[in-house]
Image (tube, rainbow, N blue to C red):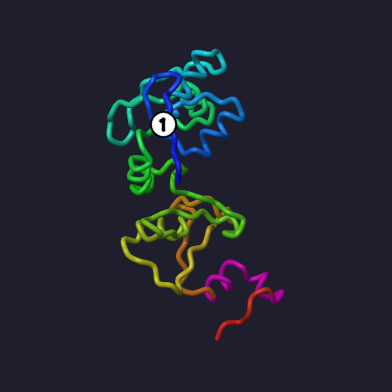
Amino acid sequence: MESKIVGCVFCHKTYSIPLFRYRYNQRLGRQNLCSLQCRNRFLVSMGFKRKTRWERLTCFQCKRNFQISKTLASQKRYRKTHKTFCSALCKRQFQERGGKWHPCWKGGRSQAPAHKGYLMLNIGPNRRMFEHRVVMERHLRRKLQPSEVVHHRNGNRADNRISNLVVCKSAGYHSAKYHPRKRLLGKFLPTK
């Protein structure tokens, strides 16, 4: 490939450019600039571009000082992403900690329509449990059996006070004791 040696208009350094690129720049009336930095400085000096203003910040992960453009800093403030990182690696290391250190952390409790009003609780990495079962396990100081059912006395599935919870040995016992009317109407299948 043929190349031509030209001088940078801004820093006056000589550099090699492919001949097709040189001809293309000549045809469009573009200046010969050796790098992107020279191009930006040239545009600033000609008044086509504002000079970048910088803001000094501290990395949230490694506590190192770094610079960020004022525009990016204002965007972060607008988006309310207060945690700023010096690199993508620092951000990834911070997010891999998980739990309350993750930027999307909302306290570890969630209530989704699929849960039918019950609260879910994060109890470990990739482990979730219904909050009323966790509360009862802590109160009893033992794990609940899979067949055991925790009943809410006042019917409010989000009220997980220990005074509002009762453990039933099976789903059949639970439906017979606490929902006899529904059982008579055929909403529950009879147990063996």
Task: Tell me which segment is drawn in magenta.
Answer: 172-186
Q: Residues within 10 Å of mark 1 (few under 14, many from 20)?
A: few
* Residue placed most toward the observer, 48 or 190: 48
Question: Can the viewer see residue 154 in this picture?
Answer: no
At x 70%, y 77%, the residue is 186
Where residue 114 sits, quadrant-wise, is bottom right
- The structure residue drawn at horizontal position 54% and vertical position 70%, both measured from the top left corner, is 174
* Percent position of residue 132, x then y: 46, 57
Which quadrant: the C terminus? bottom right
Question: Compared to 122, does 63 lie above or below?
Answer: above
Residue type pointed to by label 1: Ile
Is residue 20 at all visible to an observer of this figure? yes
Q: Is residue 140 above or below residue 14?
A: below
User: Measured along the vertical axis of the image, is residue 7 above or below residue 22?
Assistant: above
Observer-nearest of 39 and 137 = 39
Where is residue 138, by image quadrant? bottom left
Q: Position of residue 170 (x, y in %)?
A: 49, 74
> Whole-percent x and y of residue 86?
35, 33
Q: Please name the residue that numbered disc 1 is placed on.
A: 5
**Residue farthest to the bottom?**
192
Q: Residue at x 63, y 71 (%)?
A: 180
Query: Magenta region, mostly helix, strand or loop?
Result: helix
Residue 31 within the segment the image draws in magenta = no
